[in-house]
Every structure is written in structure tokens, then in C-alpha cells.
Amino acid sequence: MRQSDSLRRFVFERYPFRGQLVHLGPAWRAMMEHHDYPAEVRDSLGEAVAAATLLAATLKFQGRLSLQLRGAGPMRLMLVECSDGLAVRAVARFSGTPATLDLRELSGDGTLTVTVEGDDVSSRYQGVVPLTGERMSDCLREYFESSEQLPTRLWLRADAEQASGLLLQRLPVTSRPSSATESGTGGVSEEEIEDAWNRVQLVAGTVTGAELAELTDRELLRRLFAEDDVRMFESAPVFFRCSCSRERVATMLRSLGREEVESILAERGSVEVRCEFCSRSYRFDAVDAGAILTPAPEVSGGGVH
Ligand SMILES: [Zn+2]
């Protein structure tokens, strides 16, 4: 049996290519537990979860990556965030009963935004592209082809039970892992590398949803890249973890303004905010609300983080 909720890195010994496999089972089901998404929205979101996790795992620094789809279609928002430590959360907003898996239709010709943020605010990168592909993997292919980043391809699948994905990335020859260089890649010509890159993409393109979902990492890599020398690394755990907190909700309420908060209090007696990602509920009665709206005398009152 394959490990659940895990991400596995691998490298091609002969070529400057690296890859990752991700599987989310229990974490994916926990993410969906409090949501009643139509299958099309759920599966699209699951593919985005697998994609965000794979891309976050390529980050070279502490921070997070988010994938966001926005449009005027039946699924007007899809947002997935994943940290470099592979804590992921996701949400979609939809209306009606979307009956297509085509992201362009689902989102109403929306846009895909990829944001990478380091914990030190200085490293922030954001790319926005129109949704030109049917599925998330197609849209990300366009995204990578139109950006200055490393050539990267993803294959994704999701259903009610799990979300899985495969990523392949071509590294610049100069920065290939030193261990791979030592194992003899020095003699491989640029042309050979190009041919091999085309070949591994074609082969990866034959992966079926069932194979991604059911085979162990070792079985899958053997099945796909039998003619290549592929080295697998230890797998890393993936988590569903929400970063919401009472303090963050209080900050959000402060930004709403006293008047708005007081009118909700007058109407309902308390303010209740439900986190869209994890469905946790935060309740503020009149006393709590008064405390967060009145600037606290001590310095700790304004903390956002
Ligand atoms: Zn939450």
C-alpha cells in the first residue's frame, strides 16, 4: 500500500530532471468534510490542491504558495494555499450546479494567479494568466510556458477519495544535483537531454488516474520510467492545516469597522464568523467585540500574526 498524505521527490540520474509525486487521502477528505461541493467543483479543487502541494514543495525558502482562480462563471473562486512545510488548505465558491470539468467554463473565462510569498516579505512573486486550458494541468502548462521559470509539467487527478499528482521539472544544466553529475551525466549532450525531456513528458502523459491513485510511488516510477535510472527520496508528510485563528478574525472584524460590527451585534446579539477553509466557527459577543474594537492599552493589541 502506498503511504497516504505524502509527497515524494525523485531525480533522473542521467538527466537534469527532477520530479515529485503527491498523494492526499485522509487530508483531502478532511478538507472536503464540511463542504458540499458538486463533483465537478470538488475534483477541480482536488487537482488544484495536488498542484499547489507539488509547486510548494519546489520552494527554496520558507513561505507559501497559492493558486487562485477567479471568474464570473458558476465557480467564481477557487483558492488553495500550501506552505513550504506542506500544510495545505483550500476553498471554492460556486453557485448553481456546474456540469463541466472545463475550468474555462466553470470559472467563466477567468484567470489563474500563482503567488509565492516568503516569510520575509521581501520575496514575493505573483503571476497572472488567463485560463486557456481545460484542466488545471493545462492552465499551469500555459503558465510555465509563458513565464521565465523552469520548464515544469504536471499531471493531476482527484475524486471524492483522493487527490494525486505528478510533477516533472527540467533544471538548468549548471544547477543539476551534484550527485547526478558525479554519476555520469557529464557526457550527455544538450540534444540528448532535449530528446529525453520530450520522451519523459510523453511517457508521463500516459499515466492514468487509476495508476496515480493506486500504485505505490515505486511501482508508478518503474512503470513510467523503466528505461531511466530514477532515484527516489524519502517521502514527506502532507497536512491539511488551516492558518485561521481568533486573532486573525478579530483583525478582520476591526477592518470591517465599528459601525458594521455594532449593527451585526444589534441584530443578532453576537458576531459569528465561520472560516471558509476549515469551517471553524469564531463567536464574539458584545463584550468580546467591545474589547477588540477598543484599542488596547498594551502593545499586544495590534498583533496580526
Ligand atoms: Zn480555518
Image (cartoon, helix red, strand yellow):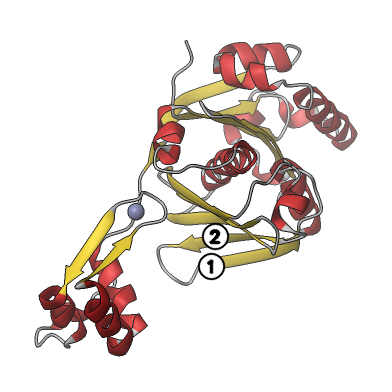
The residue closer to the viewer here, 74 or 303, is: 74
Residue in view at x 40 percent, y 44 percent: 85
Real-space Cα distance between discs 2 and 1?
6 Å
Where 162 falls versus 175 (above or below)?
Answer: above
Q: Is residue 225 visible?
A: no
Residue in view at x 40 percent, y 63 percent: 119
The residue closer to the viewer here, 44 or 40, is: 40
Query: Which percent across, then down, holds residue 298?
Result: 9, 84
In the figure, residue 194 lies in which quadrant? Answer: top right
Query: Which percent across, then down, holds residue 208?
Result: 72, 20
Where 300 falls versus 196 (above or below)?
Answer: below
In the figure, residue 146 lies in which quadrant? Answer: bottom right
Where 92 falls versus 302 (above or below)?
Answer: above
Label count reads: 2
What's the amino acid at mark 1? Arg
Residue in view at x 77 percent, y 52 percent: 104
For mark 1, what is the residue?
A: 124
Q: Quadrant of ligand 1?
A: bottom left
- Say whether marks 2 and 1 touch (CB < 8 Å): yes
| SS assignment at label 2 | strand
Residue in view at x 32 percent, y 58 percent: 244
Query: Which percent across, then down, holds residue 277?
Result: 41, 52
Query: Which percent across, then down, holds residue 47?
Result: 61, 39
For mark 2, what is the residue?
A: 116
